[in-house]
Image (spheres, coloured by chain):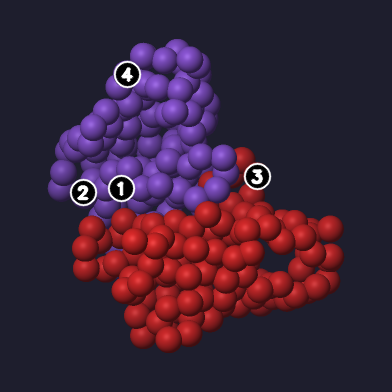
Amino acid sequence: SQQGEEDPQALSIQEGENATMNCSYKTSINNLQWYRQNSGRGLVHLILIRSNEREKHSGRLRVTLDTSKKSSSLLITASRAADTASYFCATDKGASYIPTFGRGTSLIVHP
Amino acid sequence: GAGVSQSPSNKVTEKGKDVELRCDPISGHTALYWYRQSLGQGLEFLIYFQGNSAPDKSGLPSDRFSAERTGGSVSTLTIQRTQQEDSAVYLCASSSSQVMAYEQYFGPGTRLTVT
């Protein structure tokens, strides 16, 4: 069963707007990661946030983690057409080093 | 440096045939993962190798699926007597347990179609 679930399933915005995607999970985690996937092939790692961290930034990306709500958000600011992709969150928990992926959010950025 | 590579990139096979999918991880990465992704779905974990430890096979969907990792490097995923429901993209990832723990580097995948 999926540990993390992304919301919304699909998001369509105009270039220049911000895009926010959310990930909710069921049990306590060690780490949460966000990945991007273009054209249904390999995934690219974006950000890893540990359970004792609350916020991380990388360029136009901002990730927050709220362990009390068991949720995370990925914000992409000033979106570009090239940001069009599917975005997945992945969590790992306990002694397992195997990340569990959600079903992803499909983001379309219109030029 | 070279990333994770997978071969073949596409494979079409007839139902009932065996297939082998290959993954070359990043040199020096001790952890290797296999996932499969059906159309429009998330990633389904299949198997995990870490160094010389026994692999975690908990995600393999049936005994028709098996995987090996030779010399701590190249891995082969074998599917015997393929079924149409095996059609998916099979993704391999590797990671270093020593730097940026758990960040995975993915290969481009093998798209398997069973006819």
Residue A62 or residue A94, whichever sits in front: A62
Q: Quadrant of residue B97?
A: bottom left
Q: Amino acid at mark 4?
A: Ala
Residue A79 position (above or below residue B17): above
Quadrant where the image shows the C terminus of chain B = bottom right
Nearer to us of marks 3 and 2 is 3
Residue beneath disc 2 = A51
Residue pictured at 49% horizontal, 36% vertical: A86
Identify the hue of chain A: purple
Q: Which chain letter goes with mark 2?
A: A
Q: Quadrant of residue A16?
A: top left
Report helix, strand or loop for mark 3. Answer: loop
Residue A93 or residue B27, whichever sits in front: B27
Looking at the image, residue A23 sits to the left or right of residue A2; the answer is left
Residue beneath disc 4 = A78
| Tag 3 and tag 2 share a subunit | no
The x and y percentages for residue A12 are 50, 19
Q: Which mark is residue A32?
A: 1
